[in-house]
Image: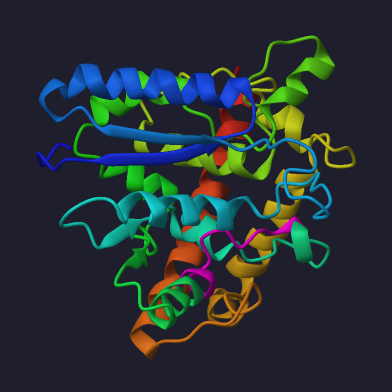
Amino acid sequence: MENHHKTALISHAGDSHTKSAQIKLLAHLQGKYPDLAPLYLDLWMVFEKNLIPGGGNENTTRSRSFLFIALGIFAISGMKGVSSLEVPENGLIALNVPLDELRIGSHSTRTTHPFYLDSWNLALRGLGIEFSIQNPYWNKTKGEMADECLSKEFLLQVIQDSISCSSPQKARWSGAAPKHCGYCVPCIIRRAAMNKAFREEGDSTPYLIDSVSEIAASHETGKGVQLRSFQIAINKIKEQPQRAKILIHKSGPLSGDSVYLQELSDVYLRGLLEVDDFIIKGIESERQI
C-alpha cells in the first residue's frame, strides 16, 4: 500500500477477540491509506453442528490453514487481473522446525510450510486453475520484516492492536482480559521481532507476563516451556551452525536447488539468533533494574 497498490485482505476468525483486532487494523489502514481502502473479505470460522448431514462434528481447528487458503483462492477467482494469492509469513514460522524432540506432529503446524504451499500449487494446476500461491517473506525473519517495513512509524503505532498470541483467551485464567500471554512460541517470536525492529522505541504491546527472567525461571511449567525449547534449539545451532542445513528438513519435504535450500537454512539460523538476542538482552536489562 505504501507503493500505491490496491490490496484485498482475506481472513477468517473463530472468536470475538480476533475479530475485534481485525476490525481495528482495518480502520487503521483505511485512515492511513484513504485512497487505497483495502477490500476486506472475511469468514467466521465456527460452523453449526451437523452442518453436513452424517459428516460428524470437528471440534479442532487443524484444518484452518486449508480453509484459509481455499477462501483466498475462492475470493481472487472473482477478481479481474489477479492471478496470485500472497500468504505472508516469516521464514522461521513457515519452516516451523521442531524446537526439540518432543515438538512433533500437531505440536508444530505446517500452515505456510514451503511443501504445503507447493502442494497447493500442484493441486491448482491439476484442477486447471491458473492461480498461484506465494509467500513473499519466505526468506525473511519476522524482525527483518518489521525492520524493513516501508512505514515503520505507522507499524509501531498499530502493532499493539494486532494479535500474534496462540491463545490470548488464556489470560482469563489469571483474571485478566484477553491479551498476549508473552510466553507462547508466536509471542516469543513477536517480541524478538519487535526487539530487532524497535530497539529504542520498544514494544508497546501489553503482555500478561512481560518479564523474560520470570518466563525463563518457569521452565518447568507451561509458562516457560516454550522459551526453554527455544533455548535448547538455539544452543544446538550456536554450537554447530552447519546443522541448520539438516534441521530444516525435519519439518517436511523440501525441494529446490542448493541456493534455495541455503537461503532456507540461513533464515532458520537468523530467526533463532533473533530470539536469542531478545532473551539475552531481556534478562540483562532486568538484572540492571
Identify which residue is drawn at 52% across, 46% down: 277
User: What's the magenta region?
Assistant: 107-117
Please name the colour scheme applied to the rendered image: rainbow
User: Closer to the camera, 166 or 82?
Assistant: 82
User: Where is residue 176 drawn, in percent x and y?
Assistant: 73, 10
User: Closer to the camera, 33 or 81?
Assistant: 81
Judged from this view, the residue extending furthest toward the front is 53
Q: Can you see residue 203?
A: no
Left-right relation of 142 to 285: left
In the displayed structure, 179 sits above or below 97; it is above
Identify which residue is drawn at 43% across, 70% down: 266
Judged from this view, the residue extending furthest toward the bottom is 257
Identify which residue is drawn at 61% across, 38% down: 45
In the displayed structure, 269 sits above or below 76; it is below
Quadrant of the rendered image containing residue 105 = bottom right
Q: Does the stretch in magenta take in 126?
A: no
User: Closer to the camera, 104 or 268?
Assistant: 104
Identify which residue is drawn at 67% across, 68% down: 236
Left-right relation of 267 to 173: left
User: Where does the C terminus fall, quadrant-wise?
Assistant: top right
Left-right relation of 37 to 273: left
